[in-house]
Amino acid sequence: MKNLFAVAIIFLSAGIASAQPAPNGFAIFPANPTTADNITAKVTVGCVKNIYTTNPYRVSMAQNNITVRLGEYRDVIIGLCPPTPDDEIDLGRLPAGSYTLTVISAAFGTQASAALVDNAPFTVTTARLRTQSPTIRLVYDGSWWNPADSGSGLFIWQDPLYRTFAAWFTYSTEGMPQWYVFQPIWPTSTATNTVDLIQTSRMPSASFPPPNPTTNNVVGKASLDFTNFSTVDKGVLTITLTGGTTQVINIQRLTR
């Protein structure tokens, strides 16, 4: 494929207007993509006479090594080469880490497929490092429990901007399962404000999903605190039910 196609790889992110050149003939756009960026690999292929590709592509990843296989070339009769005969490859959001990218051309005629870009490195950093303080110091996303209280626990979800939603599952005094939700707000890097604890309910119905509206009831307050721990795997959940006592629950990340 030598001298047939000129290839440029650009990583795109909405809202970023400049790119920094990178090794191995491609550039990262933005210069340092983060976990909050939706990354697109843009492959620009220069035409030779009337040959160019606009076909689908395939993306695969083994560990942190990403491979893109371009679609088949088309022999299209045109007067001039299109100004941007591009293949745009959506890689989505990637976890923080170091990656390599390989782009493989399709076979054409007697030409075998070849690596247009071969193990080109790039790095994705956590979006948290780009945000201003106060912000979340560590990643608390995952499943949590107290080993001394099997059968209850806490789920924490965080999006790429580290907005947080938590669901606490436990038992009532009658031994029935109970679910509560809250949305922690992080005024510091290690502890949340005390926010409303919500219990939802909905009247049953013969149809699914039930047409009846959901009722959100504030039943107390909740907060999370990781101040006294140097690890992402331990913390404290504090629950105060309205008209009841305060529960201070030592939680730890559920691991295999």
Image (cartoon, rainbow, N blue to C red):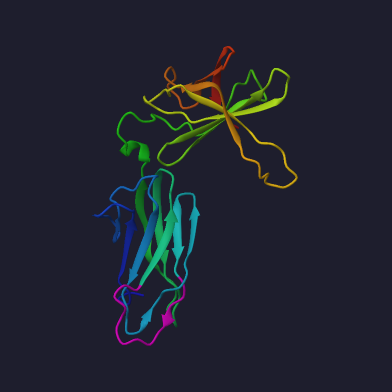
Which stretch appears magenta? 71-85
Instruction: Tell whether 88 sits left or right of 143.
Output: left
The residue at the point 30 percent across, 47 percent down is: 32
Q: Is residue 45 magenta?
A: no
Q: Quadrant of the C terminus?
A: top right
Q: Percent from the top left, x then y, of residue 167?
A: 57, 31
- Residue 117 visible at all: yes
Q: Quadrant of the N terminus?
A: bottom left
- In the displayed structure, 71 sits above or below 207; it is below
Residue that extends furthest to the front in the rendered view of this protein: 212
Q: Percent from the top left, x then y, of residue 134?
A: 33, 28
Q: Percent from the top left, x then y, of residue 207?
A: 72, 47
Instruction: Tell whether 225 sits left or right of 147.
Output: left
Total number of numbered discs in the rendering: 0
- In the displayed structure, 76 sits above or below 65; it is below
Instruction: Tell whether 219 sits left or right of 74.
Output: right
- Classified by dominant secondary structure, the portion drawn in magenta counts as loop
Q: Is residue 72 magenta?
A: yes
14 or 71, nearer to the observer: 14
- In the displayed structure, 81 sits above or below 253; it is below
Residue that extends furthest to the right in the rendered view of this protein: 206
**Which of the 4 quarters of the picture holds residue 133?**
top left
The residue at the point 54 percent across, 24 percent down is: 252
Q: Percent from the top left, x then y, of residue 29?
A: 30, 54
